[in-house]
Image (tube, coloured by chain):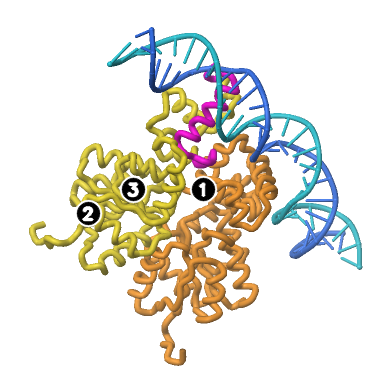
Chain colours: A orange, B yellow, C cyan, D blue
Amino acid sequence: MSEVAATGISVLLVDDHPIVRQGYRRVLESQGDLRVVAEADNAADAYAAFKAHDPDVIVMDISMPGASGLEAIRNIRARSPRARILVFTMHNEAVLVKAAFNAGASGFVTKSSEPSAVVTAIRAVARGERAMSDDIAHVLADDSLSPTGSALDQLGEREIEILRQFAGGATTEQIAAHLNLSVKTVQNYHYLIKTKTGARTDAQLVRLAAACGLTKI
Amino acid sequence: MSEVAATGISVLLVDDHPIVRQGYRRVLESQGDLRVVAEADNAADAYAAFKAHDPDVIVMDISMPGASGLEAIRNIRARSPRARILVFTMHNEAVLVKAAFNAGASGFVTKSSEPSAVVTAIRAVARGERAMSDDIAHVLADDSLSPTGSALDQLGEREIEILRQFAGGATTEQIAAHLNLSVKTVQNYHYLIKTKTGARTDAQLVRLAAACGLTKI
DNA sequence: ATCCGGCCCGGGAATTTTGCCCGAGCTGCG
DNA sequence: CGCAGCTCGGGCAAAATTCCCGGGCCGGAT
């Protein structure tokens, strides 16, 4: 596209809710300097759209069906290290934030933020800077001050993802199918998560996940 | 507001994510016949806004921090039975759907639906009809093939008590000891509660209990 | 280069729990 | 009285859990 404006920032929207994407698109495009050049609702399409449109910034939710959003970030960054990815999700757990940045994200903004925070973050990420919303900064600050850390800090990425889906109400089979794992592996993770967090009951696990913002109720 | 167009549908938006509300507002208002007259990000504000603006339809997400969305629905309907509430959330569990309708919702649309589905549902609800998105209809259809009851309402006192303790994180043995029952009986109640509510997972049970205000998280 | 430790993925086997059947005692109600 | 519903538990096959194990992979330390 040779006629692309020199000053515009092109954006790829990745979110599994069509209506939510619609809304974002309108909000972003009302800014003047932001153009949504493509949308995707899953990790695979996200990479294809990235290759096809070469956007300046990818705005993506990391809680999507199928492959984990973190996995998608890693995939994209592995093949295109100059990709700028702004994570835009409702989760605000320190573990997730750190995992996202480790995976290669350039920014992290929660959906609880003011709309202006997203726009600001997109512009910062487009300039190659790191960006995060105020609440995320607070979460990370609190986390770095606490000696023991959150109960979820001792969990690996896979464990977090499985805990999220489990607490969300998914059955073991559904999780296994979503993540392409054997049922046995999911069961083992389930058990491991319980022992690591000290939860003696599935209900306690759900409460823990909810308390940490991993899932909403 | 004497200048209100006679043919417009006024909408109150309830969602805890500002940017999401922004987006919905733009999507809905681009329809011409829909006007967003107020927004709220929690249950208490939702009722205040409803009283102040008397909207034709309330579009609300039921996963909000603090008070349960179902509780909010019950509150609003109890005081204003003519209120039309369209639940608009990402959750698609049969238990939640049934609980929402039991609480007094007029419609249920998931965020995975096409934007047009929401608009259609809003218009239907405004006409006093019941509305739901296709995926929700499928979930309910699948669920209704088993002749279970509707939701938490048809639970006996003992069942409610056991569900409360279970959702609170108590183990089967603890519940049995606390209620002077055999472990087997508690297990049987556990199973009975699941079948009556339609929950397929302990996590779904906890979510239902939390959504109904049975336990706080 | 090698070891160590961590995460990831699953198998195996003993133990529990589920899922769903059953009967029995107790209420209240027509 | 008969019927219905709640409460309480036994029984038994099927499934899940609880531990254990090993192997592959990778990054960091020696």
**Cα–Cα span, label 3 and label 1:** 21 Å
Indicate the amino acid at tag 2: Ala
Q: Give the quarter of the image for residue B11.
A: bottom left
Q: Main secondary structure of the magenta part?
A: helix
Name the residue carrying label 3.
Answer: B42
Residue B79 vertical position relative to residue A112 in the rendered view, above or below: above
Quadrant where the image shows the N terminus of chain B: bottom left
Q: Are marks 2 and 1 in contact (CB under 8 Å)?
A: no
Q: What is the chain identity of the residue bearing mark 2?
A: B
Q: Which residue is at a point 59% across and 64% down the rendered structure image?
A: A101
Label 3 vs label 1, nearer the camera = 1
Name the residue carrying label 1.
Answer: A168
Label 2 vs label 1, nearer the camera = 2
**Cα–Cα span, label 2 and label 3:** 22 Å
Q: Which residue is at a point 64% across and 58% down the rendered structure image?
A: A180
Judged from the image, the secondary structure of the residue bearing numbered disc 1 is loop
> Share a chain, discs 2 and 1?
no
Mark 1 Cα-neighbour bin, 10 Å: few <14, some 14–19, many ≥20 = many
Q: Is residue B141 magenta?
A: no
**Which is nearer the N-term, disc 2 or disc 3?**
3
Residue A95 vertical position relative to residue B152 in the rendered view, above or below: below
Mark 2 Cα-neighbour bin, 10 Å: few <14, some 14–19, many ≥20 = many
Indicate the amino acid at tag 1: Gly
What range of the chain is rendered magenta?
A: B178-204
Q: Which residue is at a point 50% across and 68% down the rendered structure image?
A: A86
Q: Give the quarter of the image for residue B13.
A: bottom left
